[in-house]
Amino acid sequence: MGATLPNAEAWSNGGYSADQNNPDYGTHDWIADMALSIQTRDVTFLKTTYHTEFLLGTEAPDNPDYIGDTSKHHVYFASDHQLEDDASAARAEALYQGALSYLKSGNYEIAAYDIGVMTHYIADLGVFGHTMGTFTDWGSETHHSDYENEFEERLDSLSAPSGISLNDRDAYNATLDLAEDVTFGSGAIKANIWMDSNYNWAEPVFVSSAMGSLNMSVAAVAAAINHLLIEGGSSTPIPDPTPTPDPTPSPDPTPSAAPPQPPSSVTAVVDGSQVRLSWSPPSDDGGAAITAYLIYRSTTSDNPLQIATLSNSVVSWTDESALKGKTYYYWVVAENSAGQSSMSQVVSMTTPEDTNPLLLPLIISTISVALASTAALLWRSRSKHRQRH
């Protein structure tokens, strides 16, 4: 496979939130909030209406109960500036596309969550350790958790960054740009090897580089959010929780569509540490074509969280982020123009402690339960990236 992938958390999340109505606050949350503070378009749905969902999203990539794919939070460049691995950029782009879809459909709550998740994959590349790996030209980093902990301790004393220009950059390229600057250095920001070799918070040059990386992370996240708002409709409206009804409604000559029934025949197959789900379309589409399927996962029989959004033509999906020796619960939801179905029957399974390539896949039987949130898992290739000389 090549490089040994890092399994670390970069900027801190402040822990994993025990109370979803009161998210823990860490460096990832600070970066995300600072990125909102320099927006020129309406971000009330992120700053106020669904701010809690936005902050919960920032911790999901590190939280094993939600996404927990910490081996995919890196971008590697070769010493000649050639891109070698775009894992975190691809993740950011997948969440961008999910958020864009929800913005356009008016589902601001789930869009806010997906945007929060997206910010995590972008901001991680502001940490030099996420640009280094065993088989890269730079080798593995020595300092990672101590770098993160130092920022966590300084969080209360950090001032809002000033002088950051709001740019317009898609999530994929915003992540690559940040990774390239942190890898090779830019302005006051020193190259990744220098930062790791000269780790010293008493050294002004080191501190200046660290703070520059933090502020550049804010700028990259802000640019991606700005691009998303533009593509989502230039000025994203604030959802009205109590819309005023039409005083003279016109009768609808045709029956209105209804949300579909849930997908049926949901099964899970364990293959090593991966889980393959399959299902059948709903028996009743509610009078409107199915537009998407949503995958939910939890490590308990309740509190499901959305981890993928799939097109209407897809009736199977593989969970590549499942960990060995853990029990997972999965639900599938169908969506049409009128809304979402209820949860499908739940399927549960336990991945083996050790992968045996000769072990026949185990089909797990179904049980039942429900509830939701989100995170999308799509991939898009990048046609080109910025070259530096």
Image (spheres, rainbow, N blue to C red):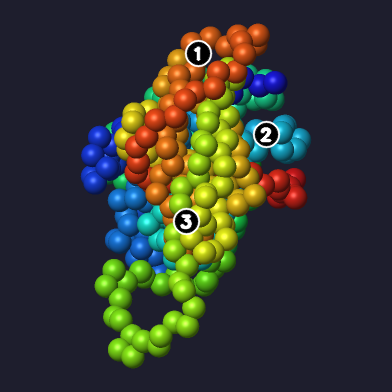
Q: Picture coordinates of residue 24 (x, y %)?
A: 27, 39
Above or below residue 183? Residue 212 is: below
Closer to the camera in the image, 206 or 348: 348
| Tag 2 and tag 1, C-beta contact below 8 Å | no
Which amino acid does the dot numbered 1 rest on?
Pro
Q: Is residue 187 left or right of residue 77?
A: left
Q: Residue at x 33, y 85 (%)?
A: 246
- Quickly name the residue at label 2: 85
Circle 2: residue type: Asp
Eye-nearest disc, 3 or 2: 3
Quarter in which the N terminus is drawn: top right
Q: Position of residue 348 (x, y in %)?
A: 43, 26
Residue 363 in view: yes
Judge from the rendering whether residue 156 lies leftward or rightward of residue 346; answer left or right.
left
Mark 1 element type:
loop
The x, y position of residue 231, in whole percent, is 57, 66
Nearer the observer, 101 or 217: 101
Q: Quadrant of the C terminus?
A: top right
**Residue 228 seen from this side:** no
Q: Which mark is residue 352?
A: 1
Numbered-mark total: 3
Distance, label 2 to label 1, CA atoms, is: 29 Å
Name the residue rendered at 45%, 34% in the picture. Answer: 330
Residue under circle 3?
260
Image point 56% across, 47% down: which residue?
Answer: 281
